[in-house]
Amino acid sequence: MTGYDRYPGVPVTIVMPTYNEAANLPRMAELVLGLPIDGLHLKIVDDSSPDGTGRIAEELAEKYNWDGRRRMSVLHRTEKDGLGRAYVAGMTAALDEGAAYVVQMDADGSHPVEAVPRMLGTAVASGVGLVVGSRYVEGGSLDEEWGKHRVLLSRFANRYARTVLGTKIRDITAGFNLWSAATLRDVDLATLDSAGYSFQVELKFKAVRAGHSAVEIPIRFEERTEGVSKMNLSTQIESALVPLRLRMRNRRG
């Protein structure tokens, strides 16, 4: 029996940032809200997507919020301001609404929805502040459609960040994570600097520095089926610089 089975009704919010994910969102909402977790809530954080993702999200919320249950909500932002800032907005709102655990999940289908109950069970049973859906522990894997260049780049980015920061988290760049509310409050989300993908590294680093433990569980990371990746040169540069900045600040502290 898992920790999840022993603690039904634990309030869990999945925060899912979106930008031009109209083709993916209906399927993702169906999969997420079909999970066997009584206290589950899906919060979409839309950065004013020009493809109408925000409107579709509102329609889905109306569909799933029935019989007095608020299972889905939408946070509309006025501009595309970076993945990190979208997560801060969504996670802060989730904490204010009483979430005991907050899950980060991409809207493109790359993260296995069915792993969420396992992540929750691990967190509740072990008491850790962070559970990472990891591609780089035993049993984890990447979609075969990833080219050799992308695989090497991803592995290098993880090894680089781990080395610079001195952390044991093997998939420190992972975007599929479950956090306890206490951990997020201790980190103080408002103090995070990273706007883009390097937010994943900064948040994990600061959580471990604050004394919270992390557990990694293996997942299979899938290639997106619709739309295009938001990763670009500027986010790659930021991802390279952030670990160095964090290390220098830590030394000064």
Image (cartoon, helix red, strand yellow):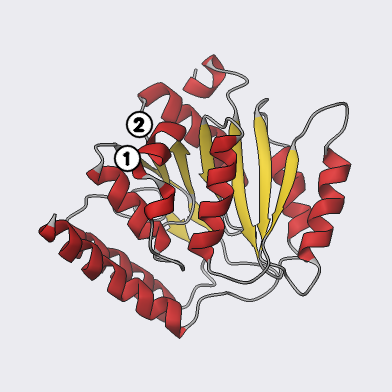
Q: Is residue 159 left or right of residue 202?
A: left
From this viewpoint, which residue is outermost toward the bottom?
Answer: 233
Q: Residue at x 56, y 53 (%)?
A: 89
Type of the residue with mark 2? Val
User: Where is 62 relative to 238, above or below?
Assistant: above
Earlier-in-chain disc, 2 versus 1: 2
What residue would you read off at disc 2?
128
Q: Are marks 2 and 1 in contact (CB under 8 Å)?
A: yes
Q: Is residue 212 left or right of residue 115?
A: left
From this viewpoint, which residue is outermost toward the left?
Answer: 251
Q: Is residue 218 left or right of residue 59?
A: left
Q: What element does badge 2 sit on?
A: loop
Q: Is residue 152 left or right of residue 228?
A: left
Q: CA distance from mark 2 to mark 1?
A: 6 Å
Q: What element does badge 1 sit on?
A: strand
What residue would you read off at disc 1?
214
Type of the residue with mark 1? Ala
Q: Residue at x 58, y 66 (%)?
A: 223
Instruction: Report the quarter where the C terminus lies.
Output: bottom left
